[in-house]
Amino acid sequence: MIKDAKYFKEKLLAEKATLEEDLIDVARENPDQPGDWEAIPNEHDTAAFEENTAGDAVDGYETNNAVVNTLEPRLRDINAALERIEKGTYGACEICGEEIDKDRLEANPAATTCKDHMK
Ligand SMILES: [Zn+2]
């Protein structure tokens, strides 16, 4: 495991907290499946729904759903990276096992591959 794992753990935890704050505005976590977020219609659009048409509420839900679809996979990557820190395998490329460059981890602490194997 790389020496700076603790430093990257702080970064991962900070990003996780930000993501969860953003998710809480647009989704609720499935109590049966932690880590699984479901979009909710936002309050603003629910109010609009009462005054206007069903269309507005559906739009609000779809917007939230799009946000969830962006944030949830990122949160999953971050949780996976935190798990690798716990297991002591953080910072190794999942394809070749080589250490991932620091600057790559700096740009994306949840990176799972080295520069040669990035998607
Ligand atoms: Zn590699």
Image (cartoon, rainbow, N blue to C red):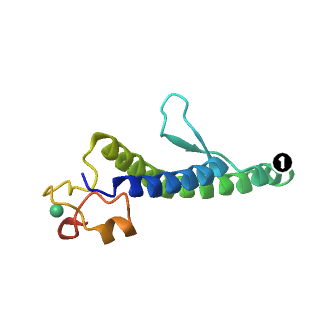
Depth check, front residue: 38 or 71:
71
Which SS class for mark 1?
A: helix
Mark 1: C-beta under 8 Å from nearest atom of ligand 1: no
Q: Residue at x 15, y 55 (%)?
A: 97
Look at the picture and state if 32 lies above or below 65: above
In the picture provided, is 94 more to the left or to the right than 5?
left
Q: Quadrant of residue 40?
A: top right
Q: Which residue is drawn at 34% across and 64% down?
A: 105
How many numbered badges does the structure rendering display?
Answer: 1
Q: Which residue is drawn at 53% across and 43% down?
A: 37
Near mark 1 (Cα within 10 A), the count class, few <14, some 14-19 or many ≥20, is few
**Disc 1 residue type?**
Glu
Residue 66 x, y percent position in the rendering: 54, 58
Q: Residue pushed farthest left?
A: 96
**Image quarter (top left, top right, bottom left or bottom right) of the C terminus:** bottom left
Residue 64 x, y percent position in the rendering: 61, 54
Depth check, front residue: 98 or 48:
98
Q: In which quarter of the image is residue 107?
A: bottom left
Q: Residue pushed farthest right?
A: 51
Q: Residue pushed farthest front?
A: 3
Q: Mark 1 points at which residue?
A: 50
Q: Quadrant of ligand 1?
A: bottom left
Residue 25 x, y percent position in the rendering: 67, 51
Residue 109 x, y percent position in the rendering: 38, 60
Depth check, front residue: 118 or 3:
3
Q: In which quarter of the image is residue 113?
A: bottom left
Look at the picture and state if 86 lies above or below 33: below
